[in-house]
Amino acid sequence: MNSVFKLKVRSYELDSFGHVNNAVYLRYAEEAKWDFLSELSLLGALEEKGLFPVILESNIRYMHELRRNDLVRIETVWSTKGKILNFEHMMYNESDNDTRACRIKGKMIFADSSRIIHDIPEELINYMEKQKN
């Protein structure tokens, strides 16, 4: 299953070299994840169940810098394995002929306030199953 999120690079996200600070790429990925959950109207369901998403790991491969006012498209491939939601974000610079800027692969789980890991919410599983067909 795939999702797409777009944003524009803001001036305050730049480092002293004039390109996006390396830590900001993770923030962009986080925005894409929250947008995905919001688009599926899962945030309310998660709150009702007392669950919240937790990132287990993120592996970043930087490919090309992003600069102020660049238009960024984040395409994400989502998959599941057991209680883990896998993601692979590909960031493209639409202002520079869709140049690949970054790839982030990672794993996410859903936990409650006691830090107990729960199954992936049924609503998300159902949505992903529908997308396969």
Image (cartoon, rainbow, N blue to C red):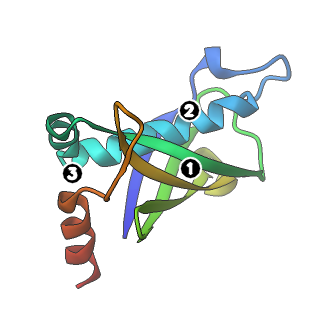
Q: Amino acid at mark 3?
A: Leu
Disc 2, SS? helix
In front: label 1 or label 2: 2
How many numbered tags mark residues here? 3
Q: Which residue is mark 2?
A: 27
Is the C-beta separation of discs 3 and 2 under 8 Å?
Answer: no
The percent position of residue 10, horizontal first and vertical second, equals 57, 22
Q: Which residue is mark 1?
A: 94
Instruction: Please rate how many residues cluster around mark 1, counting C-alpha atoms within 10 Å: few if below 14, some from 14 to 19, many from 20.
Output: some
Instruction: Please rate how many residues cluster around mark 3, counting C-alpha atoms within 10 Å: few if below 14, some from 14 to 19, many from 20.
Output: few
Q: Residue furthest right?
A: 17
Q: Name the foreground residue: 120 vs 104.
A: 120
Q: Name the foreground residue: 27 vs 43.
A: 43
Mark 1–mark 3 distance (CA, rounded to whole Å): 25 Å
Residue 133 in which image quadrant: bottom left
Q: Amino acid at mark 2?
A: Arg
Mark 1–mark 2 distance (CA, rounded to whole Å): 18 Å
Horizontal side, residue 60 vs residue 111: left or right:
right
Q: Amino acid at mark 1?
A: Glu
The percent position of residue 33, horizontal first and vertical second, equals 42, 45
The percent position of residue 58, horizontal first and vertical second, equals 64, 49
Disc 3, SS? loop
User: Residue at left 77%, top 48%?
Assistant: 64
Q: Is residue 109 above or below residue 15?
A: below
Horizontal side, residue 10 vs residue 133: left or right:
right
Disc 1, SS? helix
Q: Which residue is mark 3?
A: 40
Instruction: Please rate how many residues cluster around mark 2, counting C-alpha atoms within 10 Å: few if below 14, some from 14 to 19, many from 20.
Output: few
